[in-house]
Amino acid sequence: MNARKKSSSRNRTNTEVCAKEAEDKTLPRVQDQNGTFAKKRESERENISTCKSIYLETQPNLEDRESSSDDAPWIAFAKAAISKFTEITGRRYDIPSPEVMISLHKIFQAQYSITDIETMISYKFDEWKNDPRMSNYIRPKTLFGQQFESYVAAAKAAKEEKRDDQRELLADFNALPEAEKQRIRQNDEQNRARREREAVQSMREKTVKNRIKFSGIPEEYKAAKLEECSLPIQQYFAALDVGVSEDLLLRGDAGTGKTYAACAVAMAYVAKHTVRFVTMPYFLRAVNGTWISRAETPQEAFDRYARVDLLILDDLGKEVPKETSVAYIWELIDVRKSNGRPTIITSNYDSDDLFERLSKAGNGNDVLAIIDRIAQSNVIVMDGPSRREVCTTVGGAA
């Protein structure tokens, strides 16, 4: 008998020990008068036993709980309570502790509603979120703990007080002359419309910032301005902006402003569309699987460049590719052209030099296809040592 007890004790899981610790903390410390302590402790033990079994079955994640259990209403309540906490505070809480589970079970048994919980969390979050010390207590352990009832009472009182204030304001409003009421309504409507416009504008600005952030455009070119570029560049963007999807090749020696011009177009285009900048060596490493990042496969990397609204391929011909890389380059340009997505390519090489460099990979047919497709693009030859130099438009062939 003793051996079996010792074996059973040794086999208890860490989770049970954790739940036992929560049990010891939760039980009230009252004097045993006329059996009151024993009865209360027995009641608490039954409650804790129920919660503990529920907790053990929910590990490792509350979402895995089977809804067919007799405890389904309680589990649904617990899920909703934790979901409200995350929704209001923005703080994830995936795996509840035994202590929190026990607290939530008590709250459920006391017939509090999810609306009560939502009101309380919103009230305490607004009260504590800007307090460096108290913000640390915005957590289920505190909110659903021993002070839960007082928190709910305070939240309801504050809510009712706000309603009283609103009733007083309404009474004062109703006592005003009709002309004054109309003026206030017009002001409210104007303010509402202004707030909506500001909200829309703020959302647009955030969207553009995120697009720029993930565009890959080098920092030094994020200030590139279209008005500082030549007329042919500006004309290309004007056509692009009204939906004319045409590819562009910027060709010229190093330092003539090819990358600046391409990024200037992208920075103007990003207000309404997604853009992506990538150097050819970087692209080839990504699609050949030699890129360090494990966050995406070569196919996912290819798709990322194929699907963006405007793609800048910088320095075509700088790196002599492998045979498979030439196929990727051709497929990327062809897929984007077929789907009406414009591509801007920069290169230091003309058609003959590009053919010679790309042909070293051994895939002549794909190289010819690349050169032919580029030849169908708008081609602008960048002359001079500076991006401010006048660009000459060359029709047709590169």
Image (cartoon, helix red, strand yellow):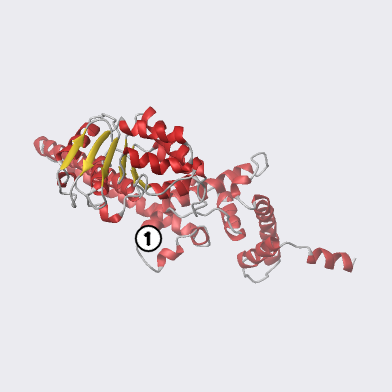
Percent position (x, y) of residue 70?
Answer: 68, 42
Percent position (x, y) of residue 232?
Answer: 17, 37
- Give the residue displayed 23% in from the left and 34% down from the top: 241
Residue 109 sits above or below residue 334 on the image: below
Q: Is residue 252 left or right of residue 182?
A: right
Mark 1 is on which residue type? Lys
Q: In which quarter of the image is the C terminus?
A: top left
**Which residue is at the front of the view, 10 or 232?**
232
- Give the residue displayed 83% in from the left and 68% down from the top: 6
Mark 1, secondary structure of its residue:
loop
Occupied quadrant, residue 227: top left
Q: Is residue 193 left or right of residue 292?
A: left
**Which residue is at the front of the view, 35 or 87?**
87
Occupied quadrant, residue 378: top left
Percent position (x, y) of residue 177?
Answer: 10, 38
Q: Which residue lies furthest to the bottom in this view?
A: 31
- Give the residue displayed 40% in from the left and 33% down from the top: 368
Residue 189 in sight from this viewpoint: no
Q: In this view, does 193 lie to the left or right of 134?
A: left
Percent position (x, y) of residue 17?
Answer: 69, 65
Residue under label 1, please give it: 129
Occupied quadrant, residue 10: bottom right
**Which residue is at the front of the view, 9 or 338?**
338
